[in-house]
Amino acid sequence: MTHPALPRRRLLGSLALLPAIGGCVPRPGFEVTPGQPVTLQPEEGLVGLVVRRPTREGCVDGFVPTYTLSVQGEPRPRFLPIPRPDESWEPDPRRADTLMKAIVLRLPARLQAIVGMSYSAPGATVSEEVAPWVFQPVPNRLTYLGGIGLRPRWTTFLYCEARAGRHFAFFDRETDIPLLRRSFPELAEVELLDRAQLPARWPTRPAELPQFAGV
């Protein structure tokens, strides 16, 4: 599968592409809204991911990465922003000071990959190519891929906030699959396929996050 070429890392001296702290992150049209009915076309499938992020008391988490998704047969990439923590995020019952959120995407049942990530940092927007996380949705099924952990980079110059960070591959079937079912009750009758994996050449749990264990 080919995908649009992305530079390894570039700074675009503008914050216009991503919302500032406190702004609303627009949700993409291919993301399923919890509680809303879903009607799939014959060649469409669902993909489920769980995102986790550590929290710090008294700090503002403004690390809002956007992932680039390349779909076979589509000339333009799709973009999936990860929202800031709000009341829809749940505490991880197995990891202290960690929030988690289930995300379900409605996608063509064709080969595709996550190939890039960008986020707004002070004074610039950072864009990075990532090792392709390749997958293929199954028609009329919910495919659980695993998950992404986010590591905010906290700064305390004027007050405690995060506007940058890192990501890594992480999943925990024992909490992820119940979270997917609980977050999207309208998909209760859709067969779930477990395809969780640690994608090759993706970073895994940072050493400073020992609570992210038991993958």
Image: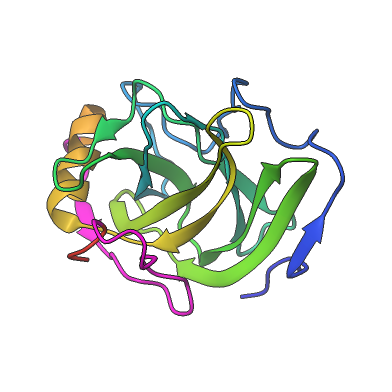
Q: Residue at x 26, y 61 (%)?
A: 210
Answer with left or right where residue 114 lies relative to residue 42.
Answer: right
Q: Residue at x 26, y 58 (%)?
A: 212
Query: Where in the figure is residue 58, as x and y percent of width and height?
Result: 41, 26
Quarter of the picture holding the N terminus: bottom right
Quarter of the picture holding the C terminus: bottom left
Q: What is the magenta segment's predominant secondary structure?
A: loop
- Residue furthest to the front in view is 157
Which quadrant of the figure has residue 124?
Answer: top right
Depth check: give the residue in front, 119 or 44.
Answer: 119
Residue 121, compared with residue 209, is above or below; it is above
Query: Where in the figure is residue 145, as x and y percent of width and height?
Result: 33, 59
- Residue furthest to the bottom in view is 200
Query: Where in the figure is residue 50, as x and y percent of width and height?
Result: 33, 47
The region drawn magenta spans: 188-211
Residue 140, compared with residue 23, is above or below; it is below
Viewer can see residue 43: no
Answer with left or right where residue 106 lies relative to residue 141.
Answer: right
Query: Where in the figure is residue 123, as x and y percent of width and height?
Result: 80, 41
Number of residue marks: 0
